[in-house]
Amino acid sequence: MRSKTSYFNSTLFKKNLARFWPLWGGASIIGALFPLAFLTILIRENALFGEPMRDPLGVTAGYYQIVAWIIPTLSLLYAALCALAAWGWLYNPRSVSMYHSLPITRKGIFVTDFLSGMAMMLLPYAVTGGLAILVSAIVGGLEPVGLAVTILAVAGQSFFFFASATAVVFVTGNPFAFAALYFIFHFIAAGAEWLVTRLMTMFYFGVERYYQGVIEFLSPTMYLTRMLDVDTTSRQIINAEGWEESVLESVTLANGWLIAVYALAGAVLLAAAWALYRRRRSESAGEVVAVGWMKPIFRYGVAFCAACTGGMALYNVFFAGYETTRTASPVPLALCMAAVGVIGYYIASMLLSKSLRVFRGSWKGVLATALASAALCAAVALDPLSVESWTPRPEEVGSVLLIVNGVNGRGVSTRLTDPALIQNILDVHQAVLAEREDLNKSWRGLGGEDVSVAYLDVTYYEGEIGSPHTSRMYNLPCSQERMERSQALQKLVALAANPAIQEANIFGHVYRENLETRLTGGYADRLYNPETKEMEQLDLTLEQAKALEDAVRRDVAAGHFGRTLFLLDDLYNQAICTGGLELYYSVTDLDRPQAGPHSQTVSLSLSAYCTETLKALEDLGIVNGSRRLLTYAEQSALESDEEGVPFEGDYVPFEGDYDPYSFPRSGSAVYPGDAYVYPGEEVDAALLH
């Protein structure tokens, strides 16, 4: 009679569970605390013995939230402990010899230890889930479909993470190497993408690249926690007490199919682990990398990570402060990357050989590491894909998020969809790129030139909402001389004061197609009282608020708002007012009328350019002899006079009746003591005297 070969040994399985009972037992106790705590709360609030909760969809939503946001991270950590418990004997030569002398085939050992490890993974989830189901059933919150999806999701994630830990076990030869390589395995893709994006940021003018998650699917924990979500639909009802409340109609685990995909990937990793175990040498216990053909991958992988991270850090410490441009110079950065890459190469070699004697005969590897580091630096710096000079075609852009911060900290931030405005933004973007050699200078490159910095941030979307996008961010040095000669800065100044952009910037969040908007009032702030010498504020009536809103719109249409964003120092202080306006609105979202109206505020900073608004304030009696609207320069002069300190500067205080609207005169932006002219305007020679 032929004997049968068993691929499962029950004695070894039980021995593993009994030996490591503190691991899965302790995890089970900790997990059981959560449903028991929920049960205690129900008892304390007398909900257990009163009317049942009867909200199964709400309970399902809670289960899905745990599956989406807690289980991936929890399974990542717990799987590493279970893998060390099930396979830790592989890291001890005596244990390896003992296991391989047992009357069990390698296949039997592999299957048994894997199943015992999976049992340790699932037992705490089973205990916690069983108690949670019991409590849910007691309070009427049990929903079969949600329960089945939750069980499958937890099992699928547990299988994937334990299979990935098992694969790493057979690559490594000691527990410390396992811990390091396990987490590297799960996050190396995201880390490599981040390193490359940082290199691009260092080399490309205006390209502030951040982690985009292009290959994040290779970092499962990050990808699952970002992609998994809970989608709910609800409806409003009137309950028995006459109150309106929201009732769930459906709950879905969004992108739950990803768990099945990762479970299949786990099966592939498990097969790879078995293939590695079949050929694993018993003598590999104690080594950092137990698979011979993976040792060069480890050596050069460590060198690559060291070259990128250490090279960039070394460059920033020793070279970045001497650069004349905001972008990095490729030669010193390549030298830094090569030097640190070689250090990483030797560190990896020492770990692999468990010896400090790794220098003899290593020149080929060192040369390859240095050349590869320099080649990576050159490949990014040469910009073969023209990332730095890229601008989209107008037909490719559905909307643009525009952020402009002027030299004085004030700015514009709005989302635009008008093709004409998008073309204006593209014109400014292209003008900035055309002058990048001049605009990309660092403080050292400016040679002591007195400049302020403006900020342009443009984000292009393929559609109006939620589409893929590309951003460009520019820090632009500004001075009087630069504003006069730079076409890019002049176009940016004109763009910031564009009536359509200012309209969207000021009123875009309260006046939209899907909103029902009603003006309710407002107030004027920081009005100077010459009798009390204090700042006051005045609440506006609805009629006053409407009149001022109309005046603001006239100023916007005339291009008066946004003109102070690029005024420098004294010019800004003489133009901008210390006081401002707040307009209050009641807004109802027509897409969600059941939510009811909510309040919104429009805050307005006024300047001497806002002639229509300033005149309306005077006509309405809000600004008069006892309530004055000061500029910063006038406030400074008054404060100096009050303290008995003579005011120094170009500004001369008004004599006689105070006239806050005498500045600027003739609609020009030319100020006493300064010959700066707002781009595109004629100079009134009389104003220079």
Image (cartoon, helix red, strand yellow):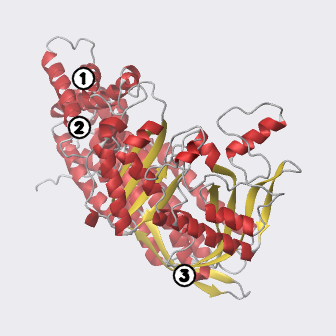
Q: At numbered mark 2, what does the secondary structure look like: helix, strand or loop? A: helix
The residue at which mark 1 appears reads as: 338
Q: Does residue 72 sit above or below 255 in this rendering?
A: above
**Which amino acid type is marked by label 3?**
Leu
Residue with the most extreme left position:
1
Residue 561: image location, x then y, percent: 55, 59
On screen, residue 391 above or below 419: above
Q: CA distance from mark 3 to mark 2?
A: 48 Å
- Quarter holding residue 393: bottom left
> Which circle, 3 or 1, is nearer the viewer?
3
Label located before the other in sequence (3 or 1): 1
Instruction: Residue 105: tell me if it is visible.
Output: no
Q: Is residue 136 left or right of residue 404?
A: right
Q: Amino acid at mark 1?
A: Ala
Q: Viewed as shown, does residue 15 lie left or right of 542?
A: left
Q: Is residue 251 above or below residue 635?
A: below
Q: Find disc 3 in the rendering and name its residue.
A: 590
Residues 383 and 614: in front is 614
